[in-house]
Amino acid sequence: MEHVEKTIEVEAPISTVYNQWTQFEEFPRFMEGVEAVKQLDEKRLHWRAEIGGKTVEWDAEIFEQIPDRRIAWRSITGAMNSGMVNFEPIDTLRTRVCLKVNYQPESAMQKIGSVLGAVSVRVEGDLKRFKDYIERRGVETGGWRGRIEGRDVQSPAEAPRSKRFYEGTESPADRSSINTEQNS
């Protein structure tokens, strides 16, 4: 199993940074190669991405989520992968984000890419694009403040994690970009 760990400082409060990271369906906006992430329920996600020139799909489950602190996941179908993202306040307006990813390269192309550091470069780029995304916006597109510990899910009363999953509509970010275009 291969391992990549990258850290970045984001010019935004920890709650804003954490809330944005919980909006998994927004990941294609800043993660290279990620074509789609679909929220299946509070714990499970379906991913589609281009890796080594090939489209791959897998399901992942979140097994730990602590608001403003940590989100940890592991694949439950497809190629083996797991990881954790930790959030640490630097001060009231800056947050340190540390992303750790573990993965098992499957194809010869993925193994060569791993040896050449392609995954490390991709993860670093994803963090930089996330930083730019949230710093430019200034506010998160949404947030899920529930807590997950193993099988136990404590959902907040105010809103589901994904409006698409529950309402079959576009995300709040999609609606705001549509509204912005219409008002232009």
Image: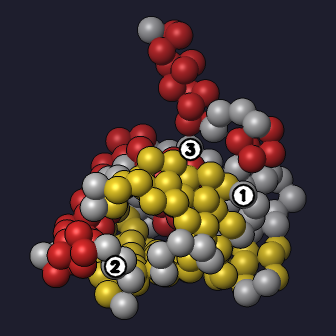
Q: Which residue is mark 2?
A: 105
Amino acid type assigned to the residue bearing label 2 in the image: Pro
Residue reaching furthest to the left = 116
Secondary structure state at the residue bearing disc 3? loop
- Quarter location, residue 43: bottom right
First in sequence: mark 1 vs mark 2: 1
Q: Which residue is mark 3?
A: 141
Q: In the displayed structure, does residue 111 sit left or right of residue 39? A: left
Residue at 32% from the left image edge and 87% from the top image edge: 2
Within 10 angstroms of label 2, few (less than 14), some, or many (20 or more) residues? some
Q: Residues within 10 Å of mark 1 (few under 14, many from 20)?
A: some
Image quarter in which the N terminus is found: bottom left
Question: Which amino acid is tagged 1?
Answer: Leu
Q: Are marks 1 and 2 in contact (CB under 8 Å)?
A: no
The numbered mark at residue 40 is 1
Residue 150 image label: none
Taking the image as drawn, is residue 26 in sight?
Answer: yes
